[in-house]
Image (tube, rainbow, N blue to C red):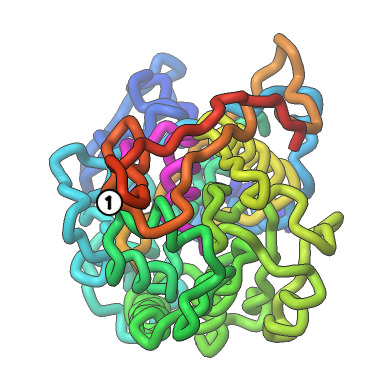
């Protein structure tokens, strides 16, 4: 144990000296500018002389391992109790962070999930760890792949000496479900007719889209993701997830199971996903947004899936029967609520979320990420910095937001729809009429 403490102290001394020499390289900045070269010497104001990454590696070969163990042993985020959690997307690590990356047609499988090939201040410390063939090695540290070097840097951000425990970093990898029968129906009928009429039905006699299942194409998209994750884990040293979460809607449960259940995972990181209510899609009047009962979901889901505590038997949020749909503000508020729950109670760093296009859009907005739309089966990773902020009003246990408003529909397939105005319904022997709704927003407690 003494060697481990000495290694950790040596690492801390290096970081203190480096920060004194280069104040711009600070936690929260996540700068990649520091790259000590062999033979280089940095003299700090405290006259601490440090030579090369190789020198430090000889003095403290297990420093990063010690830090990693410390991170794994951390418990519930007590520093966040009574504080407000503020989120920031840390840019510069994934292509999707960059405004120059066009979301249209972007495919995670063509770009290593978007992970940038870059250097990190922690390159050269600690072994590679994980991975099989280590394809894509970049020569930064022994047997280290891009994913291994990124993981080492994230471990450092969570465990370094200047982190007082009020800041946490997590890698959220969010996947949209594969194509469902509701997606196929919208393509078949066209968006105006779908939104104004067909989406309010349970199906058309041939296909069912109330809490729909995946189409064959959607199942194939989940299988494709499975093969790609397998290659990253096996050949590229990508870390296995610490935790898995899924929307309660069946298409997400199918997608998560098809993507992850057959992966060769470490024994201490099994696929045991948690079904969380608030990771569901935006709650419109469409029946595809209405979840099944808890009993039906339990009977449908593989045994590995478990419900979060307090998961209700019946869907208490969907108000489509009253022609009411969720506002954007309400969806963002509940997305903040579910993120707060995950960050405050899950000490894992690598988090998988299987959800929906609209919900992932809301989550990205809460995280301060640029808008990045996803096609069915697509995946986006985000490095998130969460800070528990003292002072001010503590976050309440529930979140208030303008909740549900009436949405216009037609009683028969519409003529068309007009952006910003709504459905243009057909009339018998008369002029097509614009469907009306009574905009009466309410406050709803989540």
Q: Position of residue 165 (x, y in %)?
A: 67, 33
Horizontal relation, residue 274 to residue 427: left or right: right
Report helix, strand or loop for mark 1. loop
Q: Position of residue 417 (x, y in %)?
A: 29, 44
Task: Find out whether residue 105 is within the magenta segment.
Answer: no
Q: Residue at x 72, y 11 (%)?
A: 391
Q: Residue at x 70, y 69 (%)?
A: 292
For residue 224, which quarter of the picture?
bottom left
Q: Position of residue 427 (x, y in %)?
A: 36, 48
Other residues around mark 1 within 10 Å, as few (<14) / some (14–19) / many (≥20): some
Residue closer to the observer: 265 or 305: 305
For residue 40, which quarter of the picture?
top left
Horizontal relation, residue 396 to residue 4: left or right: right
Horizontal relation, residue 359 to residue 117: left or right: right
Q: Residue at x 61, y 24 (%)?
A: 440
Residue closer to the observer: 269 or 227: 227
Task: Find out whether residue 369 is within the magenta segment.
Answer: yes
| Position of the C terminus by quadrant | top right
Is residue 119 visible in the rendered image? The answer is no
Is residue 380 visible in the rendered image? The answer is yes
When the figure is inspected, residue 268 is found, relative to residue 166, above or below; the finding is below
When the figure is inspected, residue 133 is found, relative to residue 268, above or below; the finding is below
Horizontal relation, residue 52 to residue 324: left or right: left
Total labels: the figure holds 1
Q: Position of residue 319 (x, y in %)?
A: 67, 47
When the figure is inspected, residue 430 is found, relative to residue 112, above or below; the finding is above
What residue did someone put label 1 on?
415
Residue closer to the observer: 202 or 141: 202
Residue closer to the observer: 211 or 164: 211
Magenta-highlighted residues: 353-373
When the figure is inspected, residue 22 is found, relative to residue 231, above or below; the finding is above
Q: Residue at x 49, y 82 (%)?
A: 205
């Amino acid at each position: 144990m003494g060697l481990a403490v000495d290694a950790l102290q040596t690492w801390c001394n290096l970081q203190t000296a480096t920060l004194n020499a280069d104040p711009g390289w600070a936690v929260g900045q996540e700068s990649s500018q520091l790259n000590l070269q062999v033979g280089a010497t940095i003299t700090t104001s405290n006259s601490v002389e440090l030579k090369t990454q190789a020198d430090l590696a000889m003095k403290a070969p297990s420093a990063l391992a010690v830090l990693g163990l410390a991170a794994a042993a951390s418990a519930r985020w007590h520093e966040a109790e009574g504080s407000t959690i503020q989120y920031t997307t840390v840019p510069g690590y994934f292509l999707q962070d960059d405004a120059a990356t066009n979301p249209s047609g972007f495919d995670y499988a063509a770009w290593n999930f978007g992970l940038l090939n870059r250097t990190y201040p922690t390159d050269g410390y600690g072994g590679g760890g994980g991975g099989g063939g280590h394809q894509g090695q970049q020569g930064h540290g022994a047997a280290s792949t891009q994913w291994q070097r990124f993981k080492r840097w994230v471990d450092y951000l969570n465990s370094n000496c200047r982190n007082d425990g009020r800041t946490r970093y997590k890698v959220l990898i969010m996947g949209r479900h594969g194509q469902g029968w509701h997606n196929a129906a919208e393509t078949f009928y066209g968006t105006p007719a779908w939104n104004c009429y067909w989406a309010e039905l349970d199906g058309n006699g041939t296909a069912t889209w109330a809490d729909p299942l995946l189409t064959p194409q959607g199942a194939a998209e989940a299988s494709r993701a499975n093969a790609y994750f397998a290659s990253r884990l096996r050949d590229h040293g990508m870390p296995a997830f610490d935790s898995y979460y899924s929307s309660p809607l069946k298409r997400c449960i199918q997608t998560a199971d098809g993507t992850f259940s057959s992966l060769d995972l470490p024994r201490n990181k099994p696929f045991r996903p948690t079904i969380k209510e608030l990771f569901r899609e935006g709650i419109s009047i469409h029946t595809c947004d209405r979840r099944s009962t808890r009993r039906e979901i339990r009977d449908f889901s593989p045994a590995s899936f478990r419900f979060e505590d307090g998961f209700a038997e019946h869907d208490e949020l969907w108000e489509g029967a009253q022609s009411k749909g969720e506002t954007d503000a309400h969806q963002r508020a509940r997305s903040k609520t579910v993120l707060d729950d995950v960050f405050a109670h899950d000490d894992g760093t690598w988090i998988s979320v299987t959800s929906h296009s609209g919900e992932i859009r809301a989550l990205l907005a809460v995280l301060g990420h640029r808008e990045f739309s996803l096609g069915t089966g697509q995946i986006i990773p985000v490095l998130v910095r969460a800070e528990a902020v003292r002072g001010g009003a503590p976050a309440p246990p529930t979140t208030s937001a303008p909740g549900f408003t009436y949405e216009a529909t037609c009683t028969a397939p519409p003529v068309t729809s007009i952006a910003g105005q709504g459905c243009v319904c057909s009339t018998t022997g008369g002029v097509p009429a614009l469907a009306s709704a009574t905009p009466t927003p309410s406050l709803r407690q989540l």
